[in-house]
Image (tube, grey):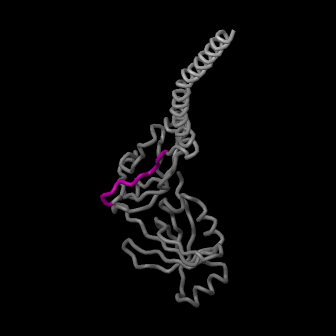
């Protein structure tokens, strides 16, 4: 994939007042730091920057920044937005050193959830617990995103970070933990229907068992009625 390029300009004035005037003029103040150079205040065209920020790759790729007639490789490190307006208040970039590992958050792209046993056989719904993950690698190995294949996902067996297939040279930064990346849960409605069906079967059996003794009781009443009829017949014979 071609490296994303953008243009920045040296920023001569600093401070709140200068930054405010830049924003009024359609510019966004920023800074680039790291590497073997001093931190450099910069300014960027605000509308072009806002458009670039909508691109996922701009947040997790090595960028080519044109500044003062030369190009530098940088990473986006921080963006400060206005509380309620679509306006960049300040932006930070870090210079990239080829032989030094970088730590980044990269997005996760999920595939094959619909083909997993959890969905196809168990009717579960897949939940993405994480949408990005911390990694460490050399700049040349930095992936734009990490693919998460959910084809083998089952309910009760969540996919954890340790189960991810990472590109060569990339390691996760989980600080001794193993966070869940994705899990499959059977919807509550389906669970309730299964439980209701399971509860209904014994109830029907109990009802059938309860009605069985009714037949002897009915027979006993019929026998009593017949005995009464015979007694009445004997009384009538004696009177005759």
Dividing the picture into quarters, in which one does residue 20 lie? bottom right
Quadrant position of residue 231: top right
Where does the image place residue 153, in percent across and percent down from the top left?
A: 46, 40
Residue drawn 66% across the image and 78% down it: 26
**Numbered range of the magenta stretch:** 175-184
Question: Would you say residue 182 sits in the magenta stretch?
Answer: yes
**Foreground residue among 115 and 80:** 115
Q: Is residue 227 left or right of residue 100?
A: right
Q: Is residue 46 above or below residue 221?
A: below
198 lies above or below 20: above
Q: Classify 132 as above or below 40.
A: above
Residue at the spot 55% in from the left edge and 60% down from the top edge = 4
What residue is rendered at 40% in x and 79% in y? 38
Q: Residue at x 49, y 35 (%)?
A: 117
Of 40 and 169, nearer the camera is 169
Query: Quick one: 170 or 114, which is closer to the camera?
Result: 114
Q: Where is the C terminus found, in terms of image quarters?
A: top right
Q: Position of residue 201 (x, y in %)?
A: 53, 31
Instruction: Farthest residue to the left: give it.
Output: 176
77 or 27, nearer to the observer: 77
Question: Residue 97: horizontal and vertical position, in percent?
Answer: 38, 65
Seen as rendered, the residue at the extreme bottom is 17
Indicate left or right for 16 with 240 as reference. Answer: left
Give the total of numbered labels. 0
Task: Determine if the magenta segment contains residue 123.
Answer: no
Q: Find residue 79 and report its horizontal and vertical position in percent.
A: 53, 72
The extreme front residue here reads 239
């Amino acid at each position: 994939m071609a490296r994303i390029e953008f243009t920045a300009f040296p920023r001569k004035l600093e401070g709140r007042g200068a930054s405010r005037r830049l924003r009024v003029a359609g510019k966004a103040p920023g800074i680039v730091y790291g590497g073997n150079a001093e931190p450099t205040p910069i300014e960027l065209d605000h509308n072009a920057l806002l458009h670039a920020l909508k691109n996922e790759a701009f947040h997790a790729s090595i960028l080519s920044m044109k500044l003062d007639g030369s190009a530098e490789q940088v990473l986006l490190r921080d963006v400060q937005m206005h509380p309620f307006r679509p306006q960049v208040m300040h932006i930070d970039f870090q210079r990239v050193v080829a032989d030094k590992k970088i730590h980044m958050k990269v997005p996760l792209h999920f595939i094959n959830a619909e083909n997993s046993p959890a969905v196809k056989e168990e009717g579960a719904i897949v939940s993405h617990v994480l949408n990005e993950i911390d990694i460490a690698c050399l700049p040349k190995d930095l992936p734009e995103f990490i693919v998460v294949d959910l084809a083998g996902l089952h309910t009760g067996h969540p996919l954890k970070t340790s189960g991810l297939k990472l590109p060569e040279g990339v390691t996760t930064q989980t600080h001794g933990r193993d966070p869940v990346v994705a899990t499959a849960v059977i919807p509550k409605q389906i669970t309730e229907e299964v439980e209701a069906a399971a509860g209904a079967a014994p109830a029907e059996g109990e009802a059938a068992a309860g009605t069985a003794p009714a037949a002897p009781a009915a027979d006993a009443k019929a026998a009593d009625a017949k005995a009464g009829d015979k007694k009445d017949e004997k009384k009538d014979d004696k009177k005759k």
